[in-house]
Image (tube, rainbow, N blue to C red):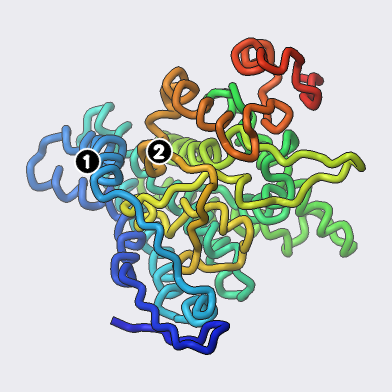
Amino acid sequence: MRGYTGTNVDGQAIHYVDKKRWLWLLSVVYPLQPIFVILLHARSGNELWFAAPFLFNYLLAPLLDWIIGEDRNNPPEEIVMQLDRDPYYRRLTYLVVPLHFLSLVISAWYAATQALSWWAFTLLAMFAGIIAGLAINTGHELGHKNSRLEKWLAKVVLAVPAYGHFTIEHNRGHHQRVATYDDPASARMGENIYKFAIREIPGAFKNGWATEKERLTRRGRSVWHPNNAILQSYALSLTVSLMLLLLLGWKAIPFLLLHNLLAYWQLSSANYIEHYGLRRVENERGQLERCEPHHSWNSNHVFSNLVLFHLERHSDHHSHPLRRYQSLRHFDNLPRLPNGYFGMYVLAYLPFLWFRVMDPRLMKLPHVAGDLDKVNIDPSARAAIFLKWGREKMSEPTCLDTSE
């Protein structure tokens, strides 16, 4: 297995081996799950196979994260540049792009051409959409890089779930406003995931479109100019959708609607848990503090990180957005999730359990220390949160936005 050698500040040689080097291939094959399920149904004729991936991702995957546990290993800082430059890792992100399209096309073809019951059709479309949510994760990894190829591939893969505004809004919106009240992709304490999704999905599109319009206006161009990066991705989405409609008939319409809706839901699920309740505060001069590692929730659980291109080491990502997935680091004493993302999704879908588990964790964070002024709070939950968590201060939080 390939190793990397460097020298530390004391002049001593360092040798590092990424023991997960070949395991990162899981992020490449994971989007092929719908195809595996289709093969199982074609072989057996049993439509219950279409329910199997839901059980795997929302029951078995969290169990695997719990059994395998966490990996807090970090690559030495002295060899991070070597690790980032290793072409093997970026080639995996290139390779998975056509596989996302393959998963979409085969799933749509099978749903439209086979004599499936309505519920089997629905399950297949929904799960294909959940997997398309991983296409947004691939676009996330690619869209942060500076090379033209990777930026172009990000637009291409985001066409799978028709979410072409993501890179613009995420890079120039979310990363600027993260952990603030103004960020649609930062969940507030007391806000359940369903309310969050209703706010986040249209809010992200609105912000992304406004950001791209501003960029084009500064260059003296119309928002409808061919250089509009959002329209470029959506044009490919439209092309793919029309081709599927022409080839497969009317059944492509409900399939794509379910597919895209579930892809958006998958992204909202990740966004919900990544910054829940965390808040960047203003100093006495009204200046917003810079984004720090403690403004993201993290998980070092092995399985889910291996299939999500290390997305769960989210603090280091926000600190170093250009850093590639294989080089992201763990930090001690940061907000930590009790399970990987798949397990946290399940918890989030049951708000009463989510609040019971996550609110105490949020309030016990060292940088929060029970101070509601350091928490991003949902205005509609303000009174209940104050009654439960603000009694010791005997004063309401001073920095809550009450405009909503």
Which quarter of the picture shows residue 181? top right
Identify the residue position indicated by label 2 in the image.
338
Residue 129 coordinates in the image, percent (x, y): 40, 42
Image position of 194 (left or right of 320): left
Residue drawn at (45%, 17%) of the image? 352
**Which amino acid type is shown beneath numbered disc 1?**
Gln
Which mark's residue is nearer the viewer, 1 or 2?
2
**Which amino acid type is shown beneath numbered disc 2?**
Pro
| Depth order, front residue of 378/126 | 378
* Vertical relation: 204 (above or below) 199: below
* Vertical relation: 77 (above or below) 70: below
Residue drawn at (50%, 63%) of the image? 328
Residue 280 coordinates in the image, percent (x, y): 72, 41
Image position of 169 (left or right of 359): right
Residue positioned most to the left: 44
Determine which of the numbered discs, if any, sits on residue 70 in the image.
Answer: none
Q: Is residue 111 visible?
A: no
| Depth order, front residue of 344/372 | 372
Image position of 219 (left or right of 203): right
Residue density around tag 2, few if under 14, some if 14–19, many if 20 or more, within 10 Å: some
Q: Identify the mark nearer the N-term, 1 or 2.
A: 1
Identify the residue position indicated by label 1 in the image.
114
Residue drawn at (45%, 88%) of the image? 13
Residue 43 coordinates in the image, percent (x, y): 9, 47
Residue drawn at (67%, 41%) of the image? 179
Residue positioned most to the front: 10
Residue 390 coordinates in the image, percent (x, y): 67, 17
In three-dimensional space, the C-alpha distance between marks 1 and 2, rounded to whole angstroms, equals 41 Å
